[in-house]
């Protein structure tokens, strides 16, 4: 787009003609001719088509910035903001557990979190200490991390699907002094208890499983009943830039990394969602996403804590109960990930899907192919698709329902929100630079890596990274927009159209998306290799027709043909989360490696799971039967036709 140059030329011509004594009307006409002749007409078209969208986004940006500035100056924190909300509407429902039908008012949530704060204060925990929470999604989960935050203790929110090595790793790297786990996860904690330090305090919340109480574990619920529910007499001296909790993300390589979430980041994410999609205090939000992830705990629960909405929780998504829950609890807003929408569309038509009051669905990953089908069938007027990782500073949002778009950046005022798509080598993900050493901005239609300029003094542009400094440094590039600056590297390739709408292109690095989770190929490769006596293994994602994300496929060196897929699966169930277990296996004589012994995956990914592409033995995980099937042409055809549940 040549608008900036054309604009400058037209202004110069206007001034020169006026200085020569020509009337203003003649000068203006000539300037307009120069502008249009220089390509400015395209810019005028963009202005006409996007001005309303961009003005609304600018107002949202200003509103969030002003709110954040107010809270920063007042030295507020998320617990303090919630306390004010609870005092204003103590009897309003805050959280509802759809699984048990238990309802907590704002006063009850405030009292429970106060009891948590007082208990851990009495136990000697001080600001800056870390406590890990390993609990399924229910009101207690929110009350626990909120209560810990009231005393300045930072919670490490553990993925409930973690087992054995990944679980022990996350606990170890968090630096936690205590672990709070749900009774339903006792067996998982027992598996790693020998790897945990003896000084780690363990508390069990909720009903015990058949395993009974673990050694050196205290029941949390009786302790909380005895604790004071009054606010702390001396709250910690914390502000919006201090750490609130940690959310684990698989990132691009290796085992999960603990992303730092400060109070201002929590507020920013929730506030943008609230204002961008015009949520109101009367709305009831249905949240069936995991609370150890950003979407469920910040975008969802954040509406309750910061703006006073009622949030209905369900610890696990159920396609058959989704609309029944929405009708029962009068929900007006629902959250989704792409898979949820697909699962709902595969359900038979039911009465409840026509009786609900849902007007807005907020989430990410809704495929363009089913976008309109979802809105038409279920009568949801607005889709609030957005893009952003837990730790990123370049989140974007689709505020006007553009089908398929995950957000936009203004073409009129691109510098208001300093994010860019820059050219990158998509094979190596290396940033491409110009003669001055700066990154090269992408033009409309060109795929590029999304980056966001870092400014640690600005809560909208800061990047707090991870507990690991080395992991943090890998996500920062320098001299991106201008010499000496720094920017966050998203790791995701997007494409922007002429109007500024952005569309997801691919996910880079050694991860792929499956069942709404980021699967780390490095982690799965490590587990498989260890189980098979350090055999060479390559793990990658492959696309399956009609299925969201990429299914995991493992190529395993089996030169003697002795590997038993189903014996391997029995072991995988013990050590990998369900979403991380490979759907496809490829057993081959050897795995290709480079001269430096790095495993090559390009050819394997290209060939996928099509038996016509290879003579190697292929297997498919039949989830319904719970074992691997030999993958021949007939099975391949059935997979591609959707005959198997994935």
Image: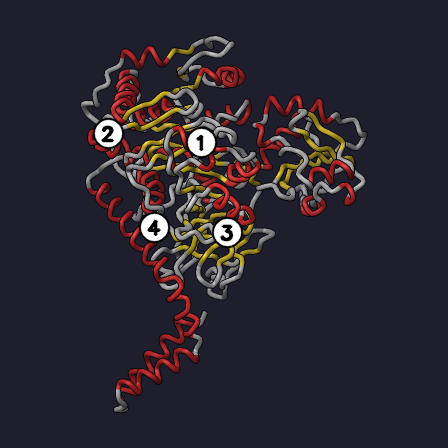
Determine contact: label 1, label 3, CB under 8 Å.
Answer: no
**Which residue matches tag 2?**
86
Determine contact: label 3, label 4, CB under 8 Å.
Answer: no
Residue 455 image position (x, y, % from top left): 34, 50
Residue at 37 percent across and 29 percent down: it is 329
Q: Quick one: 454 or 503, which is closer to the camera?
A: 503
**Which residue matches tag 4?**
455
Secondary structure found at label 1: loop
| Crowding at mark 4 (Cα within 10 Å: few <14, some 14-19, many 20+) | some
Secondary structure found at label 3: loop
Q: Nearer the viewer, mark 4 or mark 2?
A: 2
| Crowding at mark 3 (Cα within 10 Å: few <14, some 14-19, many 20+) | many
Distance from disc 3 to disc 4, alpha carbons, whole Å, reads 30 Å
**Which residue matches tag 3?**
404
Of labels 3 and 4, earlier in sequence is 3
Of labels 1 and 3, earlier in sequence is 1
Q: Quick one: 273 or 436, which is closer to the camera?
A: 273
Distance from disc 1 to disc 4, alpha carbons, whole Å, reads 34 Å
Residue at 39 percent across and 57 percent down: it is 484
**Quick one: quadrant of the C terminus?**
top right
Residue 28 visible in this rendered orientation of the protein:
yes
Disc on res. 218: none
Q: Nearer the viewer, mark 1 or mark 4?
A: 1
Determine contact: label 1, label 4, CB under 8 Å.
Answer: no
Residue 529 image position (x, y, % from top left): 66, 30
**Which residue matches tag 1?**
288
Of labels 1 and 4, earlier in sequence is 1
């Amino acid at each position: 787009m040549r608008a900036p140059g054309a604009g400058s030329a037209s202004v110069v011509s206007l001034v020169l003609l006026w200085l020569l004594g020509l009337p203003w009307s003649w000068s203006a006409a000539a300037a307009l001719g120069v502008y249009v002749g220089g390509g400015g007409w395209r810019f005028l078209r963009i202005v006409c088509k996007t001005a309303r969208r961009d003005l609304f986004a600018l107002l949202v940006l200003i509103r969030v910035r002003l709110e954040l500035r107010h809270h920063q100056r007042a030295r507020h924190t998320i617990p303090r903001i919630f306390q004010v909300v609870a005092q204003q509407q103590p009897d309003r429902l805050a959280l509802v557990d759809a699984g048990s039908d238990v309802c907590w008012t704002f006063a009850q949530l405030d009292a429970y979190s106060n009891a948590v704060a007082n208990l851990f204060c009495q136990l000697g925990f001080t600001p800056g200490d870390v406590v890990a929470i390993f609990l399924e999604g229910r009101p207690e989960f929110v009350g626990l991390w909120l209560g810990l935050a009231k005393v300045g203790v930072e919670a490490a929110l553990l993925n409930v699907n973690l087992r054995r090595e990944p679980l022990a790793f996350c606990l170890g790297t968090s630096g936690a002094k205590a672990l709070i786990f749900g009774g339903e996860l006792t067996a998982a904690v027992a598996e790693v208890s020998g790897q945990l330090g003896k000084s780690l305090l363990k508390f069990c919340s909720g009903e015990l499983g058949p395993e009974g109480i673990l050694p050196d574990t205290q029941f949390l619920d009786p302790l909380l009943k005895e604790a004071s529910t009054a606010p702390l007499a001396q709250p910690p001296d914390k502000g919006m830039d201090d750490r609130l909790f940690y959310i684990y993300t698989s990132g691009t390589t290796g085992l999960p990394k603990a992303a730092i979430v400060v109070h201002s980041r929590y507020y920013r994410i929730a506030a943008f969602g609230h204002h961008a999609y015009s949520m109101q205090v009367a709305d009831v939000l249905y949240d069936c996403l995991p609370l150890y992830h950003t979407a469920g705990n910040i975008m969802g629960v954040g509406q309750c804590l910061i703006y006073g909405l009622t949030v209905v929780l369900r610890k696990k998504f159920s396609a058959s109960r989704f609309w029944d829950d929405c009708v029962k609890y009068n929900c007006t807003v629902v959250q989704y990930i792409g898979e949820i929408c697909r699962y709902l569309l595969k359900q038979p038509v039911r009465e409840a899907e026509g009786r609900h009051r849902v007007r807005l669905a907020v989430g990410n990953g809704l495929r363009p192919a089913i976008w309109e089908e979802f809105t038409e069938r279920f009568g949801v007027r607005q889709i609030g698709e957005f893009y952003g990782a837990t730790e990123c500073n370049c989140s974007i949002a689709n505020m006007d329902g553009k089908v398929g778009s995950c957000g936009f950046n203004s073409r009129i005022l691109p510098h208001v929100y300093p994010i860019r798509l820059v050219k990158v080598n998509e094979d190596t993900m290396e940033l491409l630079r110009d003669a001055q050493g700066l990154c090269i901005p992408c033009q409309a239609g060109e795929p590029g890596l999304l980056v966001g300029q870092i400014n640690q003094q600005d809560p909208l542009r800061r990047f707090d990274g991870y507990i690991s400094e080395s992991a943090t440094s890998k996500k920062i590039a320098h001299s991106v927009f201008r010499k000496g600056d720094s920017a966050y590297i998203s790791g995701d390739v997007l494409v922007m159209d002429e109007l500024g709408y952005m569309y997801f292109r691919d996910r880079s690095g050694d991860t792929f998306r499956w069942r709404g989770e980021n699967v780390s190929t490095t982690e799965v490769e490590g587990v498989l290799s260890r189980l098979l006596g350090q055999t060479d293994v390559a793990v990658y994602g492959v696309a399956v027709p009609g299925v969201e994300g990429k299914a995991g496929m493992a190529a395993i060196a089996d030169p003697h043909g002795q590997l038993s897929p189903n014996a391997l699966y029995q072991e995988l169930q013990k050590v990998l989360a369900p979403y991380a277990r490979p759907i496809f296996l490829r057993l081959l004589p050897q795995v290709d490696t480079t001269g430096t012994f790095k495993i090559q995956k390009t050819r394997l990914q290209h060939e996928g799971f099509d038996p016509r592409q290879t003579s190697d033995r292929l297997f498919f995980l039949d989830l319904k039967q719970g074992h691997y099937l030999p993958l021949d042409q007939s099975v391949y055809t059935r997979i591609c036709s959707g005959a198997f549940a994935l």
